[in-house]
């Protein structure tokens, strides 16, 4: 923007010059060399800016992927299992299969559960068959979304399912420390409980 404004304010300075505008050939050649060098430096600066922008995008993408992996896999063992399993699947052709399908690849990269989806694709041949046998890209993405919902439901179910300890003392805490039998486990205990009341 500044360069455009400068060109508008000083048109004589930026006007293209020819041989007749100079006293001798040496000054004209110096001018041409200077113009060429300025163009080269300008192109180099633009190229450097583009490379920096690409590098920043790569770093941001790598950070996002790392955050998503940390979110999906809590322990170091799970992360290591994820990395080795996915790399083995990529070596066996999963990477080419995903890269061929641009929309599927973008969906996995942009999804918060992308690492988990990738792990599931690496370990579940049936899922790979279901996703990539779909006729069009949107159907493939819908198949991934359905599986992602199923994973979320299973995760919620695991969180909400109470863990029952078979040796747990039944009753109010602090009243009895002896293990009592579950009265609902057989009819005889249930009948004796009801008779006592």
Image: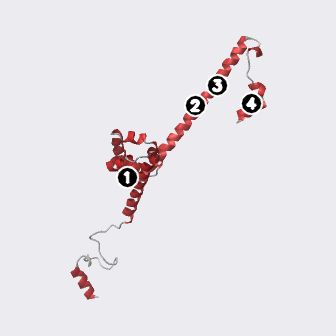
Q: Rounded to the nearest whole Å, what is the CA distance between mark 3 and mark 1? A: 53 Å
**In the image, residue 44 lies at what x, y percent?**
59, 28
* 172 up-or-down from 120: above or below: below
- Does residue 166 appear to the left or right of 3 in the view shown? left
Q: Of the two numbered discs 1 and 2 on the same chain, state the one appearing first in sequence.
A: 2
Q: Earlier in the sequence, mark 2 or mark 3?
A: 3
Q: Secondary structure at mark 3?
A: helix
* Residue highlighted by disc 4: 7
**What is the x, y in percent for residue 130?**
36, 50
Residue 39 is tagged as 3
Q: Is residue 81 visible?
A: no
Decide which of tag 1 and tag 4 comes sooner along the chain. Answer: 4
> Mark 3 or mark 1, which has the lower sequence index?
3
Q: CA distance from mark 1 to mark 4?
A: 60 Å
Q: Secondary structure at mark 2?
A: helix
Q: Secondary structure at mark 1?
A: loop
Residue identified by numbered label 2: 47
Circle 2 packing at 10 Å, graded few (<14), some (14-19), many (20+), is: few
| Location of residue 61 in the rendering, given as x and y in whole percent from the top left corner | 49, 43
From this viewpoint, is residue 85 visible?
yes
Q: Position of residue 104 (x, y in %)?
A: 44, 46
Mark 4 and mark 2: span between their CA atoms? 23 Å
Whole-angstrom CA distance, mark 1 to mark 2, is 41 Å
Q: CA distance from mark 3 to mark 4?
A: 16 Å
Q: Residue at label 1? A: 75
Name the quarter where the N terminus is drawn: top right
- Rendered image coloring scheme: secondary structure
């Amino acid at each position: 923007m500044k360069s455009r404004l400068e060109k508008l304010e000083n048109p004589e300075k930026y006007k293209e010059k020819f041989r007749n505008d100079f006293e001798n050939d040496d000054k004209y050649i110096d001018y041409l060399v200077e113009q060429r060098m300025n163009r080269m430096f300008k192109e180099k600066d633009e190229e450097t800016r583009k490379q920096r922008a690409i590098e920043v995008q790569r770093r941001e993408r790598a950070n996002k992927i790392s955050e998503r992996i940390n979110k999906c896999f809590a322990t170091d063992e799970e992360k290591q299992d994820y990395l080795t399993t996915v790399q083995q699947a990529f070596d066996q052709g999963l990477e080419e299969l995903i890269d061929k399908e641009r929309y599927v690849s973008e969906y996995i990269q942009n999804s918060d559960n992308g690492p988990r989806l990738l792990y599931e694709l690496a370990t579940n041949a049936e899922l790979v068959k279901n996703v990539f046998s779909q006729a069009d890209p949107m159907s493939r993405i819908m198949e991934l979304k359905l599986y992602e919902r199923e994973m979320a439901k299973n995760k919620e179910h695991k969180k909400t399912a109470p863990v029952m300890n078979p040796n747990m003392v039944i009753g109010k805490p602090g009243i009895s420390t002896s293990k009592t039998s579950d009265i609902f486990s057989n009819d005889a205990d249930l009948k004796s409980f009801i008779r006592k009341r």
